[in-house]
């Protein structure tokens, strides 16, 4: 996983849904419903397929906690995400709106802060609210912090593991100073339980997000085991952490509404997809949804189709809080075994457009039928073909045409990548297997993602982290052979070559990525690493100055520029970029060590000693770098 930090952010404004479900009568009359729950705990498990949970019929599952939740409450067997992508799906759950209504249509886009959220409504009603997330797509910069008085998204203290080597080591690859993009569920739950202990006396809303079982599955040492077995291991770990949250409720459990859901599923080759986000088949749209506690009936199963936008109006009523305007419906009738209103259910993926420049996909579920709007549309009879294997759009053209018209009432097929232009966001999402970085083609006929599924599958497999060594290199070479200008393929191949000391070819790949418009400075950093390895410090500095022009506030670029200038014999020139880097991120330990050396090389011994002393103060007491810093201090005395 290769990530380089950066620093800009832009906002996308998108028109809302054409049709929005009116508020229930309680909202219209200005009165909230009587509360049946005192507190709310929401647990979202990233990338969890419903059919890999025991309660949903998976025999080998190790999900006793989720299974008990299902037995103790209400299980929805046909629940669907609004998008097979982390941020849009979570935003829909929190706002009760389809993606066009909250604007976060892909990872890296910001939620429209005018959209109401569960957290905001509960905070205004006097609840203590806290969310603790495990992965960068839900970082506060993207807007889901709205309404949360506490938002735990600090994934790792930047640079704490960094060394203090005296030679030039660029902050790329596994080196220090880059942001971490995910953290174990155990760490998320530790933080959440500490907050819970401090807020038990209040009405509370606690959201816990677990990134298991998102790819890559398990530690690298275990990658020889079958992929799906490792996926099941991570589902089991998510179940363990879920159990810790529920157990910690203690006496508050009976009065607490617990909602467990996934944001989307995962494909293991179904429909030619690996991972998620490209297609809108039920493989990645169907999710588990469990509601338990707070006097809800136990052991009830609802087979009626529901969607994550229904969570917001449902939980607000159960908490006795004034509901807000949503696209979803209150699932109250289903909780008591009654039928829900007949309606269409919408879902979309704009990742094909915003990541690859291909056509977006939009779908509508109507009764037993599902229609996918695409350059080559698809129509499936779900009752006879739940696996969506037989397209009936040509056999039933009137039905397909009618559903196409209804899709258009929810959203158009247009959007812009402007909202994910933040290079830092792009680079970090790419490291998690999301954005490819290709700009959408300007209008015209865009390719149908089905026509490019082979290339997309190979890119997803590379981005997932599942491939290593020779297999990874072979996959990347196939990608660039098929698509020589592919910026991500060239960038990732460049780093594979750099990591195996083949800098001549790596530099060529980095230059190809730069000319292909890769939307981050990763390629410049890689090129600078190659130039530094050849001791061409001036060329390395040129690459880094170009990177600074692209991302002027990126502390990693500034730190590397300072390292290159210092090692290239210009210590006085190195001081300013190193100080800029530390001003942006004081915990870039390698940069602080380089600053001490640069001060010393420039004859400013007291400032060198001050920098070294500050580094010792910041380093953990057992840090292996401390002896080297001590030696530098003794030389300066």
Image (spheres, grey):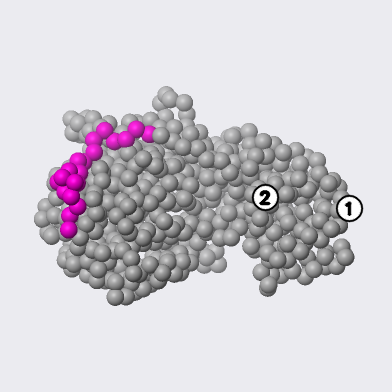
Question: Residue most toward the left?
Answer: 338
Residue at image coords 61%, 53%: 178
Q: Nearer the viewer, residue 152 or 58?
A: 152
Image quadrant containing the C terminus: bottom right
Residue 311 colored in magenta in the image: no
Magenta stretch: dominant secondary structure: loop
Question: Residue most toward the top?
Answer: 444
Say above or below: 188 vs 506: below
Magenta residues, start to end: 14-34
Q: Nearer the viewer, residue 617 or 13?
A: 617
Residue 583 is labelled as 2
Residue 27 colored in magenta in the image: yes
| Label 2 element class | helix
Residue at image coords 70%, 47%: 580
Q: Are there few (<14), some (14-19), or many (20+) residues within 10 Å of tag 2?
A: few
x and y percent of residue 282 in the render? Answer: 30, 49
x and y percent of residue 194 in the render? Answer: 44, 69
Residue at image coords 34%, 54%: 123
- Left or right: residue 573 versus residue 370 is right
| Label 1 element class | loop
- The numbered mark, 1 or 2, whose residue comes first in the sequence reads 2
Residue 603 is labelled as 1
x and y percent of residue 137 in the render? Answer: 46, 50
Residue 590, quarter of picture:
bottom right
Q: Are there few (<14), some (14-19), or many (20+) residues within 10 Å of tag 1?
A: few
């Amino acid at each position: 996983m290769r990530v380089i930090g950066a620093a800009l952010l832009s906002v996308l404004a998108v028109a809302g849904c054409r049709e929005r479900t009116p508020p229930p009568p309680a909202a219209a009359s200005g009165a909230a419903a009587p509360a049946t729950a005192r507190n709310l705990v929401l647990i979202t498990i990233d990338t969890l397929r419903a059919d890999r949970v025991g309660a949903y019929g998976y025999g080998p599952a190790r999900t006793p906690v989720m299974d008990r939740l299902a037995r103790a409450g209400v299980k929805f067997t046909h629940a669907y995400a609004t998008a097979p992508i982390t941020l849009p799906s979570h935003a829909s759950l929190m706002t009760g709106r389809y993606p066009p209504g909250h604007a976060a249509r892909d990872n890296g886009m910001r939620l429209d802060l005018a959209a109401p959220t569960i957290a905001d409504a509960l905070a205004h009603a006097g609840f203590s609210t806290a969310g603790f997330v495990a992965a960068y797509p839900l970082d506060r910069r993207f807007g889901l912090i709205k309404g949360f008085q506490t938002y735990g998204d600090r994934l790792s203290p930047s640079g704490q593991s960094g060394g203090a080597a005296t030679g030039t080591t660029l902050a790329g690859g596994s080196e220090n100073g880059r942001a971490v993009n995910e953290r174990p569920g155990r760490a998320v739950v530790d933080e959440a339980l500490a907050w819970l202990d401090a807020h038990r006396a209040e009405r509370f809303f606690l959201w816990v997000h677990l990134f298991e079982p998102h790819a890559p599955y398990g530690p690298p040492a275990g990658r020889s085991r079958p992929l799906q077995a490792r996926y099941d291991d991570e589902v089991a770990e998510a179940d363990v952490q879920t159990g810790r949250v529920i157990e910690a409720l203690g006496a508050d459990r009976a009065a607490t509404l617990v909602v467990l859901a996934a944001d989307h599923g995962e494909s293991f080759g179904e429909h030619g997809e690996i991972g998620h986000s490209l297609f809108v088949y039920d493989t990645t749209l169907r999710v588990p949804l469990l509601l338990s506690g707070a006097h809800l009936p136990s052991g009830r199963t609802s087979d009626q189709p529901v969607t994550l936008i229904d969570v917001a109006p449902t939980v607000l009523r159960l908490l006795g809080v004034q509901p807000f305007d949503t696209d979803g419906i209150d699932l109250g009738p289903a909780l008591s075994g009654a039928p829900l209103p007949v309606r269409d259910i919408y879902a979309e993926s704009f990742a094909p457009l915003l990541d690859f420049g291909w056509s977006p996909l939009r779908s509508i579920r109507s009764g037993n039928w599902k229609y996918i709007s695409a350059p080559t549309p698809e129509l499936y009879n779900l009752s006879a073909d739940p696996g969506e294997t037989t397209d009936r759009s040509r056999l039933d053209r009137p039905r397909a045409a009618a559903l196409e018209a209804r899709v258009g009432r929810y959203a158009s097929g247009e959007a812009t990548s402007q909202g994910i232009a933040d290079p830092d966001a792009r680079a970090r999402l790419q490291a998690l297997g999301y954005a490819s970085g290709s700009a959408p083609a300007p209008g015209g006929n865009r390719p149908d993602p089905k026509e490019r599924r082979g290339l997309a599958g190979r890119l997803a497999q590379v981005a997932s982290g599942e491939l290593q060594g020779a297999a990874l290199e072979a996959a990347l070479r196939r990608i660039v052979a098929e698509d020589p200008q592919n910026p991500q393929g060239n960038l990732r191949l460049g780093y594979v070559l750099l990591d195996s000391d083949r800098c001549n070819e790596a530099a060529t790949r980095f230059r190809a990525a730069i000319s292909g418009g890769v939307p981050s400075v990763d390629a410049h950093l890689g090129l600078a690493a190659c130039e530094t390895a050849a001791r061409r410090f001036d060329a390395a500095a040129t690459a880094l100055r170009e990177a600074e022009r692209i991302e002027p506030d990126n502390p990693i670029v500034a730190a590397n520029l300072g390292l290159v200038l210092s090692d290239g014999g210009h210590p006085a020139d190195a001081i300013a970029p190193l100080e800029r880097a530390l001003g942006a991120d004081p915990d870039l330990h390698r940069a602080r060590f380089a600053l001490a050396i640069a001060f010393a090389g420039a004859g400013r011994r007291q400032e060198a000693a001050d920098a070294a002393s500050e580094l010792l103060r910041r380093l953990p007491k057992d840090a292996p770098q401390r002896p080297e810093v001590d030696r530098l201090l003794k030389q300066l005395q």
